[in-house]
């Protein structure tokens, strides 16, 4: 599924019919929203038939006359000659391309989320290779922190992301999305020093080398080409990039580099020499080698423009990406720097219409899970429950970072952003059960073996995972909702410094948030999962540090004793130190539970044995 692909619908002035093109053949349109309302609650709801139509297998969406979906005539995307601050003469000489300084294009565009048939884009999509940037890969994998320096033009300042423009939905530009993703994948800090300045080109970049080296970079992103393309020969462009690399290495000899071949600018603008974009890309490719890789946005944009218009992809009509374009930039860079992701993570709402609370009551809910699929799947999947004391969610190191780690070992990682209970004790469990069922229902689509769907949790998320592993329902083949038909029993569970009991050794904040101020003994026993183990409880791996003060190791010990007594396959790893969170998700204690859990899961047949 593609989530939020941008389209600017162009309307025929004589018929009132508007058309827009998508990248992939459409199987099903999930929703159309205004770009300003993408991933936000509420807003305009557009209806198939009344507002738009499409043919299954085609790439076109058609808006009938009178559709409520915004559309614009071709003339509205032009301006009279000399009417704008910057002269953007159209190649046909008929006026100027409408140039947006801020959010004008963003406010005209529509975000389309749709399911599509598969296509082979392997020739232009990047592939992860740890050996290409070995120092960067090592620092990210070991949580040693990463200093990233970005040197480039206005695209890299953030133009024209909605967050940069200060309008909804306030999406950050690509460099900030990249840092967010790296920070979620790695447990170490990621620092970005952004030296980009609008209107600059490669000669200016050479003058900023001292500022780059002053930031002590581990990784340098060089992102020039759009402004050079007004006429700088490819040989000169390449020599300037090579000079930057050489001079940066003098001051920062261990630095590694990503050379970003820029998006293509609007082909209708006479000032841009279109042939130079491909020539620049080829020059950058020639500079790659040990510690230097290419992020090829040029080839990707070339493919995009075979299917879409410039007005679909730009935030200013000419040479800056819109929100969708910034996401593409970030995804390309993430694919080069992080292992194991087959495609961009997809968000799946648990309850699209209404979510159960209990006792036949319901509510609207934004509870969701984010599905990270591995590039080389072995069929296993893990629903991940982040911690947070049932008062919040630690979705970085205990969520998306874990998903990426699992991807690197062939398993799908599904980060569950469950509803917080606020005293409604069964709400998180209902979300966890729903997530397991959805994974099984979608197993064939996602390359998952429905008999190898596990659950993993940290701290209070460990309590939720242990609750799901001890409170489950069988398959319901006659359920009206097909997503409710599979069993909610996980096939295995991994619990890391988990809250397990609601008794004396519990975590007070988690108990208060889950059960309220004065829970009955019956309710406390029901959610004390060491008391709920049976012969049907799935195999379980537990890890806990001896010096964990907020959540004492008795939580895991007592559960392990109950598992052994019931004859359930299980392993308990008691770590000598690390406290709650295992030294901030890094170091030998953190590495130990990860390695031993993989070995145990492999021995149980849930994962391929790891080398």
Image: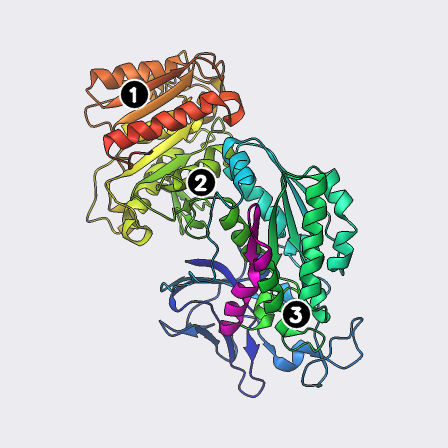
Of mark 3 and mark 1, the one earlier in the sequence is 3
Q: CA distance from mark 2 to mark 1?
A: 24 Å
Scheme by which the image is coloured? rainbow
Kindly identify which residue carries mark 2. Answer: 404
Kindly identify which residue carries mark 1. Answer: 571
Nearest to the observer: residue 59 or residue 583: 583
Residue 180, percent across and down?
57, 42
Q: Residue at x 49, y 29 (%)?
A: 388
Report the residue that reaches farthest toward the bottom.
14
Q: Are marks 3 and 2 in contact (CB under 8 Å)?
A: no
Q: Main secondary structure of the magenta part?
A: helix
Mark 2: few, some, or many residues within 10 Å (few <14, many ≥20)?
many
Q: Quadrant of the N terminus?
A: bottom left
Determine the secondary structure under disc 1: strand
Q: Residue at x 37, y 32 (%)?
A: 456
Residue 400, percent across and down?
47, 39
Q: Are marks 3 and 1 in contact (CB under 8 Å)?
A: no
Q: CA distance from mark 3 to mark 2?
A: 35 Å
The span shown in magenta is 285-307
Of mark 3 and mark 2, the one earlier in the sequence is 3
Vertical position of residue 426 compared to residue 176: above or below: above
Q: Quadrant of the C terminus?
A: top left
Kindly identify which residue carries mark 3. Answer: 317
């Amino acid at each position: 599924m593609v989530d939020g692909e941008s389209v600017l619908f162009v309307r025929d002035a004589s018929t009132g019919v508007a058309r827009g093109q998508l990248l992939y053949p459409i199987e099903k349109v999930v929703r159309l929203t205004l770009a300003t309302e993408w991933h936000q609650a509420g807003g305009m709801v557009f209806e198939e038939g009344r507002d738009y139509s499409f043919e299954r297998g085609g790439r076109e969406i058609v808006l009938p006359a009178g559709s409520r979906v915004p559309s614009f005539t071709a003339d509205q995307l032009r301006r009279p000659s000399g009417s704008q601050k910057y002269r953007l003469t159209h190649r046909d000489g008929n006026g100027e391309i409408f140039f947006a300084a801020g959010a004008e294009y963003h406010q005209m565009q529509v975000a389309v989320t749709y399911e599509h048939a598969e296509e082979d884009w392997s020739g232009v999509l990047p592939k992860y290779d740890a050996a290409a940037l070995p120092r960067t890969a090592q620092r990210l994998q070991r949580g040693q922190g990463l200093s990233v320096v970005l040197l480039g033009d206005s695209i890299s300042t953030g133009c024209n992301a909605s967050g940069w423009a200060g309008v909804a939905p306030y999406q950050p530009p690509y460099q900030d999305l990249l840092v967010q993703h790296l920070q979620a994948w790695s447990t170490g800090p990621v620092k970005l020093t952004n030296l980009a300045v609008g209107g600059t080109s490669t000669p200016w970049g050479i003058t900023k080398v001292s500022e780059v080296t002053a930031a002590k970079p581990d990784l340098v992103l060089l992102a020039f080409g759009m402004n050079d393309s007004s006429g700088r020969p490819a040989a000169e462009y390449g020599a300037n990039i090579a000079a930057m690399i050489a001079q940066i290495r003098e001051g920062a000899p261990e630095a590694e580099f990503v050379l970003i071949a820029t998006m293509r600018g609007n082909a209708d603008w006479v000032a841009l020499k279109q042939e130079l974009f491909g020539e620049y890309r080829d020059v950058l490719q020639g500079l790659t080698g040990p510690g230097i890789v290419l992020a090829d946005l040029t080839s990707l944009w070339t493919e995009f423009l075979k299917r879409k218009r410039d007005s679909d992809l730009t935030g200013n009509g000419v040479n800056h990406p819109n929100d969708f374009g910034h996401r593409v930039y970030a995804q390309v860079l993430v694919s080069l720097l992080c292992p194991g992701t087959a495609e961009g993570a997809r968000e799946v709402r648990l309850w699209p219409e209404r979510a159960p609370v209990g006792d036949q009551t319901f509510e609207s809910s934004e509870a969701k899970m984010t599905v990270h699929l591995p590039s080389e799947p072995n069929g296993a999947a893990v629903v991940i429950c982040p911690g947070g004391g049932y008062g919040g969610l630690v979705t970085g190191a205990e969520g998306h970072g874990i998903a990426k780690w699992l991807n690197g070992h062939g398993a799908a990682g599904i980060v569950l952003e469950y509803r917080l209970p606020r005293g409604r004790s069964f709400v998180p469990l209902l979300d966890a059960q729903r997530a397991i069922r959805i994974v099984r229902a979608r197993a064939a689509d996602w390359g998952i073996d429905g008999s190898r769907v596990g659950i993993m949790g940290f701290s209070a998320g460990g309590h939720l995972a242990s609750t799901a592993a001890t409170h489950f329902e069988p398959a319901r083949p006659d359920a009206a909702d097909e997503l409710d038909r599979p069993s909610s029993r996980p096939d295995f569970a991994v619990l890391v410094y988990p809250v397990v009991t609601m008794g004396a050794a519990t975590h007070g904040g988690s108990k208060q948030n889950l059960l309220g101020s004065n829970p009955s003994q019956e309710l406390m026993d029901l959610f004390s999962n060491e008391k709920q183990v049976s012969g049907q409880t799935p195999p379980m791996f537990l890890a806990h540090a001896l010096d964990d003060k907020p959540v004492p190791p008795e939580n895991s010990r007592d559960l392990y004793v109950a598992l052994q007594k019931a004859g359930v396959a299980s392993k308990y790893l008691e770590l000598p130190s690390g406290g709650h969170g295992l030294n901030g998700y890094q170091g030998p204690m953190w590495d130990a539970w990860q390695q031993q859990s993989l070995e145990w899961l492999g021995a149980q047949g849930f994962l391929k044995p790891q080398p």
